Image: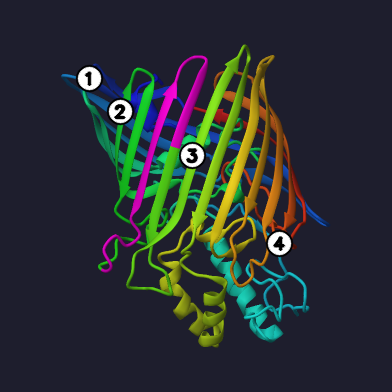
């Protein structure tokens, strides 16, 4: 696929090798990625070995096309949906959550399920029954939002149409956000395997629903501006009647690239309607990332800085506790939780601690991608520190994340790969490791390390 405005608009789609209905004025292409392998995840004394879809790239299939309208104008579209090769479904259930099962006896002073630090930490639950109920609710919330794709949507990855004009491209629909585009481009693993930058410490709005985007390229510069009319990452959450702005989304990036180096800056921000202030549109997650690459012979060096802040999560640990106590029964808890679930999304999680709550994270990335033989040897080092505070976030969460992988090209369409990754958690960090197609979940205790070994194959068509 040529490097053009169209290529930038379809930044994460793979080149298609099969076309249908090609004509002199345009074409429609069927394309896809099939990615599967085996991974072993170790978290303290707990380990799991499993077959997983989406290790180095989310498995998918899609249709895209364009038509030449003349005079420098083109029409284009993309429809892209997720596939799970391990079971043939279109869901996103790869996350692993380590915790004591709901209803199990809670021990004072120990960590149980995500979102519950311990009994007796003010204003925490006062008895094991309430704690077990809160465990269940919080785990359900985290499982619900572990996906990065729209729940129940056929074209859950991308669905948009637009026009390329002599003055830039205008696109409308569900698309990758400007901040994610920069994050994905300026790290050595891109979005592949457990070595990639997009772990829980760098959670960002990946796609925006109901979005308009303007893109332009000129003399090595690329500009992207995006506005979303609500429903970001979650089709059940559409623009609300009041207040205005609701869960609207804003994003922008600016990049410059030559054959020797590239630089870019990306910004995302969304609005939320919180449980505490249901009649007000509050500023939600805000991310700023700056990255650069430098090519030296067969090696490319990567560096990136990211700041991630969310002072207004839709629900807080205290909110969840109040819901459990006020609901009394599973049905009552579900009724109180339903309107919150309907408008929440993954960026409202404190990903490093494994709870809902505010975040204030600073992240640094250094990496290298070295062409070696018929493949690429990749290394990444990420350092993240979250300093936010809540009822249960009583100290900093810190993680050192290392990734080493080799991607061997058997052909232009088929790649074998192997990756080893390590997350050294300290303080209140408890991040486990995921991959391109799913979140990693959380360890069973603060400061517990996690490792992942992933071996698989990716085939594109």
Judged from the image, the secondary structure of the residue bearing numbered disc 3 is: strand
Say the numbered circle drawn on residue 25: 1
Q: Nearer the viewer, mark 4 or mark 3?
A: 4
Q: Dot 4 surroundings within 10 Å: few (below 14), some, or many (20 or more)? A: some
Q: Dot 2 surroundings within 10 Å: few (below 14), some, or many (20 or more)? A: many
Verify CB contact (< 8 Å) between mark 4 and mark 3: no
Q: Tell whether 121 sits left or right of 56.
A: right
Above or below, comparing residue 414 to residue 133 in the picture: above
Residue at the limit of the structure toward the right, as seen here: 45
Please name the residue that numbered disc 4 is placed on.
98
Q: Nearer the viewer, mark 4 or mark 1?
A: 4
Please name the residue that numbered disc 2 is placed on.
216
Q: Please provide percent x and percent y for residue 452.
A: 73, 44
Q: Residue at x 41, y 57 (%)?
A: 234
Q: Residue at x 45, y 25 (%)?
A: 15
Residues under labels 4 and 3: Cα distance?
28 Å
Above or below, comparing residue 175 to residue 146 in the picture: above
Q: Please provide percent x and percent y for residue 412.
A: 55, 19
Q: Residue at x 67, y 75 (%)?
A: 102
Verify CB contact (< 8 Å) between mark 2 and mark 4: no
């Amino acid at each position: 696929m040529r490097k053009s405005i169209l290529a930038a608009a379809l930044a994460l789609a793979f080149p298609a090798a099969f076309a249908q209905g090609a004509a002199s004025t345009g074409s429609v292409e069927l394309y896809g990625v099939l990615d599967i392998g085996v991974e072993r995840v170790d978290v303290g004394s707990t380990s799991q070995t499993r077959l997983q879809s989406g290790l180095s790239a989310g498995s998918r299939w899609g249709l895209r096309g364009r038509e030449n309208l003349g005079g420098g104008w083109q029409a284009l579209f993309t429809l892209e949906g997720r596939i799970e090769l391990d079971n043939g479904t279109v869901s996103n259930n790869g996350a692993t959550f380590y915790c004591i099962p709901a209803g199990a006896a809670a021990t004072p002073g120990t960590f149980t399920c995500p979102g519950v630090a311990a009994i007796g930490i003010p204003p925490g639950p006062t008895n094991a029954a309430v704690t077990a109920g809160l465990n269940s609710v919080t785990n359900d919330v985290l499982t619900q939002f572990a996906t990065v794709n729209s729940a129940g949507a056929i074209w859950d990855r991308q669905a948009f149409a637009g026009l390329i004009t002599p003055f830039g491209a205008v696109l409308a629909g569900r698309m990758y956000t400007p901040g994610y585009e920069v994050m994905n481009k300026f790290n050595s693993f891109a979005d592949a395997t457990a070595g990639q930058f997009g772990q829980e410490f760098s959670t960002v709005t990946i796609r925006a629903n109901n979005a308009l985007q303007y893109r332009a390229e000129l003399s090595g510069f690329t500009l992207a501006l995006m506005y979303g009319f609500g429903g970001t990452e979650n089709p059940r959450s559409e623009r609300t009647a009041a207040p205005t702005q609701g869960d609207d989304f804003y994003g922008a990036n600016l990049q410059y690239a030559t054959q020797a180096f590239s630089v870019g800056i990306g910004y995302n921000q969304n609005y939320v309607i919180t449980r505490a202030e249901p009649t007000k549109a509050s500023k939600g997650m805000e991310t700023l990332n700056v990255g650069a690459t430098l090519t030296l012979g067969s090696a490319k060096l990567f560096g990136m800085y990211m700041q991630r802040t969310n002072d207004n999560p839709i629900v807080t640990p205290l909110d969840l506790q109040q819901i459990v106590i006020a609901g009394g029964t599973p049905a009552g808890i579900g009724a109180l939780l339903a309107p919150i679930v309907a408008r929440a999304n993954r960026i409202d999680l404190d990903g490093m601690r494994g709870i809902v709550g505010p975040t204030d994270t600073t992240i640094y990335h250094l990496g290298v991608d070295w062409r070696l033989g018929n493949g690429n040897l990749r290394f990444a080092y990420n350092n993240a520190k979250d300093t936010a505070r809540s009822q249960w976030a009583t100290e900093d969460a810190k993680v050192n994340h290392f990734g080493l992988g080799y991607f061997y090209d058997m052909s232009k369409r088929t790649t074998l790969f192997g990756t080893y990754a390590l997350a050294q958690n300290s303080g209140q960090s408890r991040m486990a490791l995921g991959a391109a197609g799913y979140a990693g979940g959380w360890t069973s205790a603060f400061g517990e390390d996690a490792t992942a070994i992933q071996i698989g194959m990716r085939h594109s068509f």
